[in-house]
Amino acid sequence: MIATVQRLLRAADVRVVRYLWCDNANLVRTKATHVDDTPSLRDGIALTLASQAVPVMYDAVVPGSGLTPVGEAVLRPDWETLAVLPFAPGQAHVMCDLVLDGEPWEHCPRAFLRAQVAALAEQGLRAETAFESEFVLMRRGAEGLEPVDRTTYALTGPLTTHAQLVDDVVRALSAHDIRLEHVHAESGPGQLEISIPRADPVTAADHQVAVRECVRGVAARHGVVASFLPVLTEGAAGSGCHLNLSLWRDAAPATGDAGRDTSLSPEAEAFVAGVLHHLPAVAALTLATPNSYRRIRPHFWAGAYTAWGRGNREAAVRVTPGPDGAASRLEVKSVDASANPYLATGTVIAAGVDGLRRGLTLPPEVTIDPGNLDDDARRAGSVEPLPSDLAGALDALRADDVLLAALGEARATAYLAVKETESDALAGLPLADEVALLAERY
């Protein structure tokens, strides 16, 4: 196997292979090795156990994480994910599992997602997922980073102005066997959105990491900065990373049922009910920075309430009907790219599986902007606002025994410690300071 990998890499003129992983702050990190380093290619690269206890602000172990600088895990490459990087000549990257003593480490994000996929399979179902990635292109100005344009939704101009950059991104994604589905200008200054096809959840999370790396790498080659930070400009549309999900039973679609009033299958109704029930706690993993909550506001296209609706872009869960009237997919809107995609997807699935196990009842559909409901209508429809900040979401997660059990004690302890440290350090920071610190980290 390794000899084959080396032959392929040398034929592509690759000398350096990046081993990628996402930490609990959702920074995409790497250690790299030379193509001739056969032991590293075969056995992996050592990684301090403290790697999953580092916040976004600095490289130090947070207190209370249960992890220390003592001991090492291993970055074990998944060679099925190997891709040559057109934006970094002579380099390739590969997604990695975190392994300890030859077994999946309890802090490995990919292992967590696989476990939730297995839990869904116990219900006789599988999922296909995909992320819609929004980002902002910026240039360095005298006063810091500035959006490259002042576009609005779906204007043609940005696809002309940035035609070469977009083409280079498409080529880079193709090197990962990722097909571009849609691209368009979004509502915010300098903002674009990329959609790609659904895949099994682990592959889809790998693809979201690859999209971030490709977009940022290509942007750097063009002399601009691409940032996936949720909010960069006060008052402008923020950048989400909506999670699209469809349910399947073997090869048959299991999301929709045209004969039901909801257009959802009974299984999908229970799944969505579970997601909505746990959504305040899920937010701790899908809206993972204090900056995220600048975007989660009413009337902001962000899913600020625990509501669902067909075609309702203000509901946290938007149901999309297919041509026959049956729902074809679910879109969880309260997600952004500060979220580790493995943890975010796994937590949404864990919430849905709880709905399936308990046979939860779907609340009434919200057919208007939930921000326009009065208090009585919200109470009648079990419509709640999401937490207003990361601290509130972390409190909801601490109180959610189902999600804590899914995460496992060790992972939950480390994640909560990292995020509490980030919340304490960043809450109340002016937006300009957040952007200066985080724009190039996400």
Image: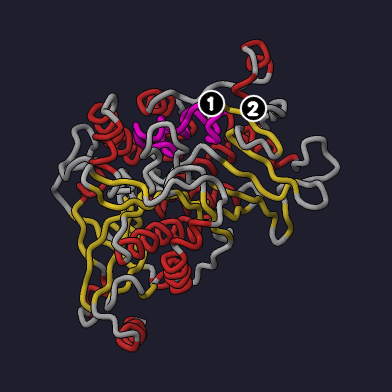
How packed is label 1: few (under 14 Cα within 10 Å), some, or many (20 or more)?
some
Disc 2 to disc 1: CB gap under 8 Å: yes
Residue 283 colored in magenta in the image: yes
Image point (42%, 29%), residue name = 397
Image point (48%, 56%), residue name = 158
Question: Is residue 46 positioned above or below 336 on the image?
Answer: below
> For this rendering, which residue is in front, 82 or 125?
82
Regarding mark 1 in the picture, which secondary structure is present there?
loop
The residue type indicated by label 1 comes to Pro
Q: Which residue is mark 1?
A: 298
How packed is label 2: few (under 14 Cα within 10 Å), some, or many (20 or more)?
some
Sequence-wise, the earlier of marks 2 and 1 is 1
Regarding mark 2 in the picture, which secondary structure is present there?
loop
Image point (27%, 34%), residue name = 432
Looking at the picture, how far across and down is residue 297, in whole percent? 49, 27
| Highlighted range, magenta | 277-303
Observer able to see residue 82: yes
The residue type indicated by label 2 comes to Asp
Q: Which numbered circle lies on residue 369?
A: 2
Looking at the picture, how far across and down is residue 410, in whole percent? 32, 40
Question: Is residue 307 positioned above or below 319 on the image?
Answer: above
Observer able to see residue 54: no
Q: In which quadrant of the rendered view does residue 374 lie?
A: top right
> For this rendering, which residue is in front, 435 or 21?
435
Give the farthest residue toward the top: 376
In the picture, measured across the screen, residue 433 lies left or right of residue 60, that is right
